[in-house]
Image: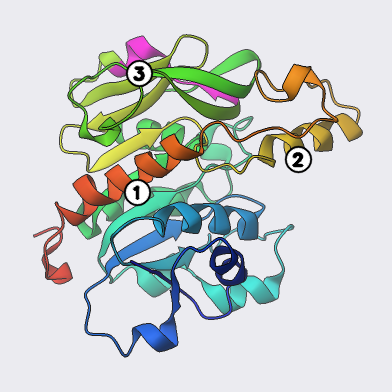
Amino acid sequence: MPIKIPSGLPAEKILEEENIFVINNIRADTQDIRPLKLLLVNLMPTKIQTETQLARLLGNTALQVELELLMMKNHISKNTPESHLLAFYKTFDEIKENNYDGMVVTGAPVEHLEFEDVEYWQELCEIFEWSKTHVTSTLHICWAAQAGLYYHYGIEKKHLDKKLFGIFEHRVTHKGSILFRGFDDVFLVPHSRHTTVLKDDVLACPELKILAESEKAGVYAVSTARGKQIFITGHSEYDAGTLRSEYLRDKNKGLDIDIPYNYFPDDDDTKEPPCKWRSSANLLFSNWLNYFVYQSTPYDINEIGK
């Protein structure tokens, strides 16, 4: 089934070339189908790249979804043209009366700051609180996972001695988890972060359960009992070349950056890195959409939160 995205969004052409079924607003308005309404809160500086990565995963299932894009009102984006934001993004004030079947909140390169020092922290807290009554299930990614765990459950992030950077092996530790139904015993996930949450801090919160983790990368997936809030500490949505771009950016700036772990063939940054996590990434988003959004949300979207 297709993913409905705003007409003219750059992701439209890219996904069509990848044979992912995309439908724009004009065609969708002629169909008598109740698509799943999803909200993407895009905090990444590379917004066009991120919206394309996530649309690719959200559109590669048997469910029809309609994707809306949200930006922070109190933040000026330096890496995305203003014309793109004005054409395709909304602010929280514009959508806060709506309900959504699912919401995805991305990471952001602000982990060196205390949460309260992030310029849009109050606005994000408003969105987190609103999601309790207006969204069936929310998927938090990387920094957003740390921010969500802090806001909802008071779990502090911890600074790492060295950046966690590369492709790491993970295992499902909660064997009954339907979020990881169909996963291999060992699966790979990209990470790119300077902070983490401690396992003991999560275990101390009775409302949460750890679903998957990594010996080297730590806690990966955390969920509430029924999956209304799901927290993913890695970047399963990353393209094959995303870590390379981040690495070369920092290397060219003269920053002290290690080569990404388990990424480049022979640790040679002149060689093309393979994507070794694509199938598990697709399964993760497919399972989330199926089990925690589609099978949990009411048919009448106005019934969410009642």
Q: Are marks 3 and 2 in contact (CB under 8 Å)?
A: no
Mark 1 to mark 3: distance in Å? 33 Å
- The part of the image, by quadrant, that contains residue 258 is top right
Q: Secondary structure at mark 1?
A: helix
Crowdedness near tag 2: few (<14), some (14–19) or many (≥20) residues, C-alpha within 10 Å: few
Q: Is residue 297 magenta?
A: no
Vertical arrangement, residue 230 with respect to residue 38, above or below = above
Residue 195 part of the magenta-drawn span: yes
Which residue is tagged 2?
A: 245
Q: Nearer the viewer, residue 86 or 294?
A: 294
- Of marks 2 and 1, the one in the foreground: 2
Q: Position of residue 236 (x, y in %)?
A: 49, 37
Badge 3 element = loop
Chain part drawn in magenta: 193-202
Q: Quadrant of residue 176?
A: top left
Counting from the top left corner in percent of width and height, residue 39 is at 38, 61
- What amino acid is labelled 1 in the image? Phe
Q: Nearer the viewer, residue 39 or 132?
A: 39
Residue on which disc 1 sits: 128
**Quick one: SS at disc 2?**
helix
User: Badge 1: how crowded within 10 Å, few (<14), some, or many (20+)?
Assistant: some
Badge 3, how many Cα within 10 Å: few under 14, some, many 20+? few
Q: Which residue is mark 3?
A: 185
> Which label sits in the foreground, 3 or 2?
3
**Which circle's residue, 3 or 2, is located before the other in the chain?**
3
Along the polypeptide, which appears first: circle 1 or circle 3? 1
- The quarter of the displayed image where residue 30 is located: bottom left
Q: Looking at the picture, which amino acid does disc 2 mark?
A: Ser
